[in-house]
Each structure stands twice: as C-alpha cells, then as structure tokens.
Image: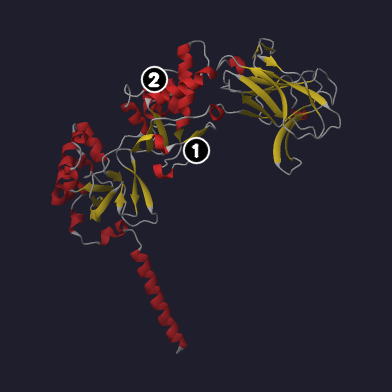
Amino acid sequence: MKISINKYSKAILASLSLLAVVSCSDPWDDHTKSSDENLKQNLAERLTSISETSEFGKLLTETGFDKVLANSKTYTVWAPTNEAMAAVPANELGSLESKKRFVSNHLALTAFGSVSTQDTVTVQMLSSKYLEFINGSVMDGASVVTADQYTSNGIYHIVNNALVPRLNIWEYIKSMNGSNAMSTYLLSLDEFNIYQSDSIAKATAEENPGIYSDSLSNSYLKNVYNLNNERNKYTFFLLEDDAFNTEVGKLEPYLIKSNADSTTTYASYFNTRDFAFHKSVAKENLPDTLVSRFGVKVPIDKDNIVEEVPLSNGVLYVMGSMDVPLETRLVTTLIEGEKPHGFSQGDKRANTYYREKEDLDGVMFKDIMVQNHGVPLFSIYYGASNLYSTTYKVYWRAINDIQSNTFQQRLRIGGGFNEMGEVVNEIATLAYTDVAPNVYDEIYIGEFYIDQLGSRNNELISLIAANSGSNGVNTLTLDYIKLVPVIK
C-alpha cells in the first residue's frame, strides 16, 4: 500500500513541476503552438491593421519600416497607442529623417517577451539606442498596456507613451555649440590635438569613419570618456559660461604654455576632463564628492544644479557653479619604482630585482633594487607626464633592507637624450640622499620648478646611483617617488 501511495505522490509532484516550468517559460518559445489568428500576419501587417496603433502603422509605411517588419527575421515592436502618438512633439516628426529615427527607436531585433529571468533587460533598438525593459511592464518609462502579442515574425507590445529618442551626452553638447562656452570648447577639440598621439588617432578615424569616428575624432572623447558611446552610461556636468570661465582662470597659472591662447586651451582641457564620470547617477543619489578618472575629488553641490537632463547614455547636469579647490585639482604624481621605462646602459637584468615584501607594519609593497652592477652613475628611467607649471616638493620611499651599509642615490628631473645616449638639458638634479638600512619612512629629498606645461623636456625622471663601480656603494632601490605640486 505504501508503494502505491509513493507512486501517486511522485506523479503529482511531477505534474506540479511541469506546470511550474510551463508557467515560467518564455511566451515567444510557445507561440508556434498557439492558434492565435495574429500568427497569420507579420508585424507590419498586424500593426497597420489594428485601430489602437493605426497612427504608428502609418509611420511604418511612410518610413519604409513596414518592409523591414515584413521580412523573415524576428523583431520586437513597442507600438505607441494613437493617443500616445498625438502627444509626440511636432519637431520629432518634422522630416522623413526624424520620422525614421523615431520609428527605429521602437523596434528591436530578436524577441523580447514580458517574461524574463532579469528584472531589467537592456535592449538595443534599431536606432542604436539602448533602452531598459523593466519587469516586462515598462519600456523606457512607458507602461505596457498590452503585452506579448504574437505575429508570424515577432512580438509586439502596446505602450501608453511614445519612445521619443533622446540625444546622447555628446549629441546634447553638440546641440549647445555656440550657446555654451564649455560645449563650444569641447567641440573645438575635433581640430585641436591635446596630445601628439591624438593626431594619429584622428587620421585613423578619417580612414575608418564607421569604426573609429565616435571615439577617436575628438581629443576629449579619446582621452577622457567617449560620451558618444551608447553602450555605456555617464554623468556629465556642463558648466554655464561664468562658472566655466572661473574654473579655467583658476588653472591657467598652473598650465602655462608658449602663448596665452594655448594656456587657455590646456587650462580648459584640464578643467573639463574632471567633469565626466563613468556611471549614471540620478540627482537624488549624487554624493557630496565624486572622484574623476584622473584622481581629482570634485565637490558636488546640488543647490548649483540649474537643470537635470536625462539622455540616452546617462545624465547631464547644467551647473551654475562648480568650485573645485586647487588643493584637490592639482593632484600628486606618484611614480612606482617597480615600473621603470628603461635603464641607462648595459644588460643588468641579472642584477635587477623586482621585489614583493612586507614592511615593518606587515603591509605588502612592491619595489625595485639594482645591486652589484658595477657601473658608476647607473640610472633607472621613469616618466612623469602632465606636470603643472609650479614648484614640486619631492619625496620617496627607498628601502635598504639587504645591506648593512648606507649608500646614496639621487634624482634628476627632466632632460632629453643626445646622440650619445646621455641625458642633457635637465631641469634640476637633486642632491645625493642617504639610503640607510631598514628605513621604511617616506623621505623629503628636495624640490624643483616647472615653468611650462607639456614640454617633453619635463617628462624624464632619472634615479641615479653613486659615481662608483664598487659593489654595495652603487646600489639603487625605490618603492615610489611622490611629486607634490605647490599652490602658488
């Protein structure tokens, strides 16, 4: 008797499990089993024939998308009601091009039903915009009033608002050209190269416009964030003219170039690069400080927000003021010892040690040590780009935990290589500094002054050993160098 009960119990459980699976399955997967009359029509035919979406159906025919939705591929359409179409601003449908852009923002390739394992599905529309389909019931803010209507080549949902295509952040900046100083400046970087590598990138973009033009044809898009990218989300702060000019003016004394126009151009760049962030943050979630990708702490005062502009790849805030203190704007340059750019002479790999150790507090660190190399004035080379036009105080941590004797090393700032491979025209050479055994403290070793931004003569940093070939005397060691800019 027990066996019989168990068999029936198993059968009941199996039936319940099957029911659960069926109830959670994707409706599109089951559409071929349906006897729905809709399946005799394709998407184009269906959307133009029903009264609730007839106005959108007319646009499909006018723009030629009726032919797209008649082919054998599978599509999803979020079709606005006639009432929703009546509320669309006239300028959004003012030309055939704008109508095509509008219609394409309602269409997606492949099937997106209301049933999903994800709360939010990001959908790439035929407009190349990415819209969020939330819980199968809300599409980019529009509520689904009728879901999962099948046709022979896809699904349509009827929504109560049109999915008017938003500009992305870069498109919005373009729309402000001539009326906003910061926007006008950013667009000028289509032609101006902040760095030498920008010209190469722009040439590449010109040769391959379909691949590179959105990210390489402007120095800001290339070096900061590609605000024309629809795949990612960003937060951008666009300053009104007075606020922009104030922030640029604060930076000009620290970004001196060969002439006043160039100084303003670079001060504008170093100003604007700190106002883009690689995430979209709604106003209510804005913290009091955001950190830019360049390490600058940017204070956020919500009271200074003039306008919040939702865009297709994030949010833009128009700011009446954006006061970034120089103390946080002029970031410290940190040079890691274990990441050299090169060495002065000879193959000394056998004498070079890249170490990973613990300090006296048990904190792990990485450094470099070159020992017993036999070369007087042996040097390790590093790079330091974008040094400001100001005085720098220099610190290092150099750990001598192998030798019992004190040795000396020094830093040379700037310079370039002559034909003999020697460094000439340096900015400053600091005095030799003792490296005593087992000192783990950061040590102040001197200062130097940079008079002009961006000279290649500024970028070379050399760590120089003693002028001796004796082992134990000409050792070099470095955890890091810290270059701290001084506020004038």
Secondary structure type for disc 2: helix
Q: Nearer the viewer, residue 394 or 222?
A: 394
Q: Which residue is mark 1?
A: 289
Q: Residue extending furthest bottom? A: 1
Left or right, 240 with respect to 39, comes to right
Q: Is residue 411 left or right of residue 135?
A: right
Q: Quadrant of the N terminus?
A: bottom left
Q: Return the residue nearer the eye: 171 or 31.
A: 171
Q: Is residue 26 left or right of residue 257?
A: left
Give residue 5's quadrant in the image: bottom left
Give me the disc on residue 377: none
* Count of numbered labels shown in the rendering: 2
Between marks 1 and 2 in the image, the one whose residue lies nearer the viewer: 1
Compared across the picture, whether 10 is left or right of 39 comes to right
Residue type indicated by callout 1: Thr
Measured as percent of width and height from the top left, residue 339 is found at 66, 30
> Residue 109: which quarter of the image?
top left
**Above or below, comparing residue 468 to residue 35 in the picture:** above
Q: Which residue is mark 2?
A: 188
Q: Secondary structure at mark 1?
A: strand
Could you tell me which residue is drawn at 75 percent across and 25 percent down?
Answer: 348
